[in-house]
Image: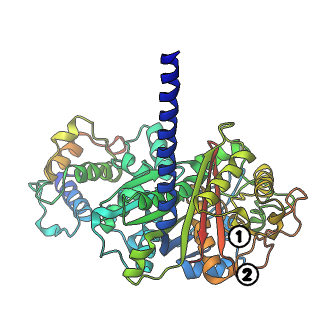
Amino acid sequence: MLVAGLTAHSAFSIFIALSRMLLTISCLKSSVQTYMRVVVTGMGIISPIGTGIEQFWNAAINGTSGISNIQCFDASGQRSRIAGQITGFDPTAFLSAKQVEQTDRFTQLALRAANLALEDAGGLEGYEPRRLAVSLGSGMGGFSTFESSAARKFQNKSAPPFTVPRIMANSAAAWIAIKHGLKGANLTCSTACSSAGNAIGMGLDLLRTGKADAVVAGGAEACVLPLTMAGFEALLALSTGFNNDPMSASRPFAKGRDGFVMGEGAGILILEKEEEAQRRGAKIYARLAGYGCTCDATHIVAPDMDGQVAAMQAAIEDAGMTPDRVDYINAHATSTPLGDIVETKAIKQLFGEHAPEIAISATKSLIGHTIGASAAIGSIATVMALHTGTIHPTINLMEADPECDLNYTPNQAVQKKIQTGVCNAFGFGGNNASLIFTTL
Amino acid sequence: MDTAELEAKVIAFIASKVENADASKITTASQFEELGLDSLDTVQLLFDAEETFGVRFDGDEVKNLRSVGDIVDYISQHPPASSS
C-alpha cells in the first residue's frame, strides 16, 4: 500500500513538473512567435507576363494572359501544346559563357529573380555573410538538362560534364549563394507544387530560430519540356482542349476547365527581422506572419480537403490569429477539374460564413502553373495586394463551375484595402503549405 | 585534312573556348593548365571538342590528354567515320 501510495504521489509530482515544463515551452513558443516579426524587404520575379515587380504587377492587375503556343521545342507530338513561357530571356546578360554552360534554365531564372530581389532590398551588405541564408523551392530541379542529357545517352553520345551539377535540385540555391556570397544555411525544398511555399516557410523558421539574419527565399522552375509535360499529360493533369486558344486555357474555377497549363518562372522574396530592417532603413512591403504545412497521407497525387484545411488553420494559428481576420486568399487553383473544387470546399470548411467575404484570386489563370515556383509568385501577388490595395483578377472566369461558388475576383481587378492574405500551395505527395502575409 | 590544317582548327577551337585567350600564343605545346583550365574545364573542353570534330574520347584516354597537341594527335589517330 505504502509503495503504491508513494508511486502514485511520485507520478503526480512528475505530472505536475511535466505540465509546468510544457506550459513554459508553450509560453516561450508563443513569445517567439509574437515577438519575432519577420518582414519582406525585397522582391524579384521573372514570369511569362513580365520581369521585375512593376512589369509583373501591371500585367497581373490588367488581367494579361502569358499563355501561348510552345515555341522552345517542337510540340507537335504533345497533347498539350501550350505553356506560360518566358521569351527573350538572355542569361548571358548576367552570366559568363562558362557559367551559362554550367547552369540549367531553372537556375538561370532563379539567379535573375534573386538579382532583382536583392537590388530591390537595397543590398544586405550590413549583415555577416554567414548569417545570410538561402531557402529555395523547386519541384523538378534541372529537368531541362535531365531531358537533354538523357536523350544524348540513349543515342550513345557522351554525357555533358556538368550534367549532375545542372540537374540537382539545390543548384539554384547554391548558385545564388555563389553569386552573392551568402554563406549561411543553403536549403532546397522539393515538395512538388508546394515547394516554394515550404521554402518560404522554412525561411521564416530560420529567422525565428535565430539561424539567420536574412533569407533569400522563393522558388524556380523551368519545365516547359517534352518529357516532363508528357508525364503530366499521362496523368491527365494538363489542359489539352485549348491548343487553338491558348489564352483561354488556364481557367481556374471556370466551367469547362480541363487541366493546368505548364508555366515557368522564378520568384524571390527577401526576408528579414522587422527591427533589423527598420534599423537599416529598408523599404518594408509586408509582414510574413505565419506558416502552416501538412501532409494528406492519403494519395500520391489526389488532393485532400482535410489536409488543406489543416495547413491554412496551422498558418493562421502560427500567426496568432483567428480565421475571421483573413480578407484575401491567393488560391493554389491550378485549373484542374478536381483541385479547384477541393480548395473551394477547404476554404468554406475553415472560414464558414466568412468565406464568401474573402477576396480570392488565382495567379495561375495569368501565367499557368509554375510548379515549384508557383507559391513564390503567389506570395509576391499576395504581398502586392497588401501593399497596393489592388487585387489582381482571376481571368477566363466568365461562368463559374457551380461547385466553385466563392468570390474569385473574376476578370477585373478590384480595389480593396486588405490586411491579411493567405497564399496556398498544394503539391503532389499530399503536401499542403499556407503562408500568412499581413500589413504592418 | 592534313596535320597543319587540323592543328590550326584545333587551336582556333581552343581559343574560342578559353576565356580571354590570345590565339596567337596558343601552340600545340600549350598545356591546358597553362591556359588556365582546371580539370573540370578540361572535361568540358573535350566534350565540346567531340561535338566540333566528330570524335569520341575514350573515358580512360581522356586523363592523358593534357595539351593542344594531345588533342590534335588523338583526332589524327581516331578520325571520324565520315572522313576516314
Same chain letter for marks 2 and 1: yes
The numbered mark, 2 or 1, whose residue comes first in the sequence reads 1
CA–CA distance in space, label 2 to label 1: 10 Å
Mark 2 belongs to chain: A
Name the residue carrying label 2.
Answer: A416
Name the residue carrying label 1.
Answer: A328
Residue A137: image location, x then y, percent:
50, 55
Quadrant for residue A182, please give it: bottom left
Q: Nearer the viewer, residue A149 or A434?
A: A434
Label 1 element class: strand
Residue A104: image location, x then y, percent:
43, 56
Q: Is A337 positioned to the left or the right of A422 in the image?
A: right
Mark 1 belongs to chain: A
**Crowd band around label 1 with a 10 angstrom C-alpha radius: few (<14), some (14–19), many (20+):** many
Residue type at mark 2: give it: Lys
Which mark is on residue B33?
A: none
Q: Nearer the viewer, residue A27 or A210?
A: A27
